Amino acid sequence: MAIDEKLLKPYDPGATEEKIYRLWEESGFFNPDNLPGTRKDSFTIIMPPPNVTGVLHMGHALMLTLEDIMIRYKRMQGYKTLWLPGTDHAAIATQAKVEKEIQKKEGKSRHDLGREEMLKRIEAFAKESHDTIVSQIKVMGASCDWSREAFTLDEQRNLSVNTMFKKMYDDGLIYRGNRIVNWDPKGQTTISDDEIVYEERKAKIYTFKYSKDFPISISTTRPETKVGDVAVAVHPEDSRYKKFVGKEYDLEFCGIPLHIKIVADKAVEKDFGTGALGVTPAHSMTDWEIADRHDLPRPQVINEYAKMTVGGENLMGKKTTEAREVIVEWLKEQGLLEKEEEINQNVGTAERTGGIIEPLPKLQWFVAVNKEIPGRGKTLKDLMREPLLKKEIKIIPDYFDKTYFHWIENLRDWCISRQIWYGHRVPVWYKDDEKKVSNISPGEEWKQDEDTLDTWFSAGMWTFSTLGWPASVKTTAGKPDKTKDLETYHPTDVLETGYEILFFWVARMILMSEYALGEIPFHTVYLHGTVRDAKGRRMSKSLGNGIDPLEIAKKYGADAGRMALVAGTAPGTDSRVDENKIKGYKNFANKIWNITRFVLDNQKEPDSKNTLLEEFNKIAQDITADMENYRFHLASEKIYQYIWHRFADEIVEESKKNEKIKKVLLPIWQDCLKILHPFMPFVTEEIWQIMNPENLLMVETWPIQKND
RNA sequence: GCGCGGUUAGCUCAGUUGGUAGAGCAACCCGUUUACACCGGGAAGGUCGCAGGUUCGAGUCCUGCACCGCGCACCA
């Protein structure tokens, strides 16, 4: 074999990677329908869809690397491998981003533009963002099936979502109710419990009595909400207050008449503050529940703009923070204020907008998680728990099981309606006094619900909505048969994602799949950690410490970036980006390049009997076991160690003196390339093309067949 | 408050069912001999957070403690 001229120069990823990706794409092998040979067993990963809010970050790069490693390994093992890519409309995040931009550039709000125009703008942004993301995924070398690409907000997914909504509604699992919800005054929408981020802040806590003749003092950090109080709750065992329980008082608080009942409730902690809690049902989650238990009224005193809705001129229409000062002033004047202390308080803020959450009672759509599903004798919570208890689903690393169960314990009904425009609209239509829940529009004369659905509602269906559930009536010729895909590829094999969305997403996918299909969405959940900067800090826009995976690919090659991300990074643990490490793997790519040159220069008739072959075989088996057991962090280091420090440093060196060894160089080297391929697909494929231009390494057979 | 994880070489981290402690980078010495200086050879470096326990044997299993990080809840 003549030595390719390219091999005489150092390896240049920039001149190689794009060309190789095109070669793969043109082969059609990303699509499982086109794979060579008979492939009985399928292996499926549905890609966690990146949000169309911007560009890929290192976390995405790690995700793509791990998933591509699994897919490439299984493809070489002879599986019918499907890796289905997609993007997420990320409702609140995307709308908030576009709104902010328009506000900044044009000084207009979404209401100035109107629903239709605003949606057009968001869609244009999403489209652009989508295109960028797709090209970035390709740069990373992801061998996913673009012919099946999905978007969480496209037509097929909308049909899935609406069908699911109707099914749940008909089963009584979705209901509309006036309940207290987390209201984000900044984003002007409700959000779910999981979208709240608690921030510790200093706050003042005031201790006072409503009026001079009221017997009990209460403490609060939010005196302005006290105009909505209907009761004072004390612990049932609290001897200080027992004698007051059941009594009712009429009084005037800052000009507002209040009717306060003393109730006993075990939710109250005796030792906190005065041990007595002023109950504001409409503006506190705990208080709402207390009101439930004691059948108390729930007057609302704050509106959606975090402004007061009661009182005279001094309060009405004021922001809560201003109203607070008014009330504190009044308390001081009246001589009612007993104490004013500074405390650390966790303030709930909206994850996406940063707005301070204002609990408010609102008419919203909910998913009932504790209600029995008709005919199944189980609740949705049960459906989420069972597959893990029965070990049908395995989480890696397994210690996340406990966190998962703990979260389910604390789960309350899931508020799924959002007052934003970008997203799946609630599939409920109204006409006069009639209401219709349907998966398609019942006609022009019907008016659709204004709200949209929580983005996790559609994301929860991702493993099967992407495979065509429910079977679409509009499936066009040439496109994959949707129903057949669902049969072939579901349940999927692995869900690979970051541990931070275990609750948001993983739990909801299990819920949705178990409920709609009666089967698990995936067998294995592989959780990766957070990629941090060199100092161990989370990468964020505000810190400006983000590292762009594309820059890395450009500077060192995607192969080097992939190896650096995965080698030595155990599942579930956070890692740091270290440019030196990446550089080391760039050097490794060049080392491979040079080894190839030497091997091709020194080819001899292969010998099949040599202890070196046996030694290699053992290592290959060991690595295969690692691959089967998701130990990619070990497999990658082992092949690296073998290639550089055993094969190159010792075997190649020895072969310079021993002609017999030269006879095993090529066979071992070819297998090394195969094993390294899932990790560093570009450079290995490029070399393979020089050695065997008629075949693609991507679909070569893995040296060791399944061995666990 | 409840729970989870971490603590291993100067730094960043691996260490699979318990069996004589590993890698990368950095630092030290030497080296251009049939690929590669994006290189090679060599040497150095650890009482595996602390205290107990189980075991023939513990970085690995159990108990307690300390510090760091994280999640959930509370937050009147």
Image (cartoon, coloured by chain):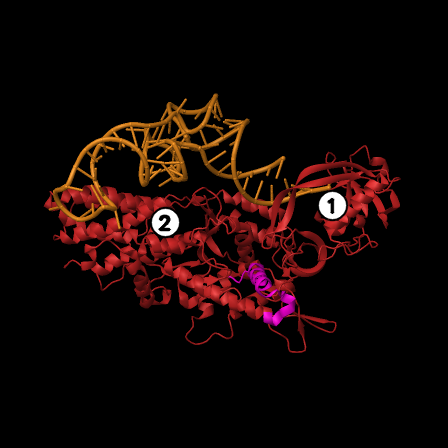
Chain colours: A red, B orange
Q: Is any part of residue A467 visible from this angle?
A: no
Q: Along the line of sight, which residue is nearer the eye, A569 or A185?
A: A185
Give the amino acid at mark 1: Arg
Instruction: Tell me the quadrant of the picture where the N terminus of chain A can be found.
Output: bottom left
Looking at the rendered image, the disc whose residue lies closer to the viewer, 1 or 2, is 1
Residue A683 occupies which quadrant of the picture? bottom left
**Residue in the picture at 30% in, 54% down:** A677
Q: Please, what secondary structure does the residue beneath circle 1 have?
A: loop
- Vertical comparison of A584 with A302: above or below: above
Badge 1 is on which residue? Answer: A222
Report x, y in % for residue A54: 49, 59
**Residue in the picture at 20% in, 52% down:** A596
Q: Please, what secondary structure does the residue beneath circle 2 have?
A: helix
Marks 1, 2 in one chain: yes
Badge 2 is on which residue? Answer: A628
Residues rendered magenta in the picture:
A88-117
Q: Mark on residue A367?
A: none
On screen, residue A600 versus residue A107, left or right, reads left
Report x, y in % for residue A621: 29, 46
Residue A164 occupies which quadrant of the picture? bottom right
- Vertical comparison of A28 with A387: above or below: below
Give the amino acid at mark 2: Glu
Q: Would you call the spot at circle 2 few (<14 residues within 10 Å), some (14-19), or many (20 or more)? A: some
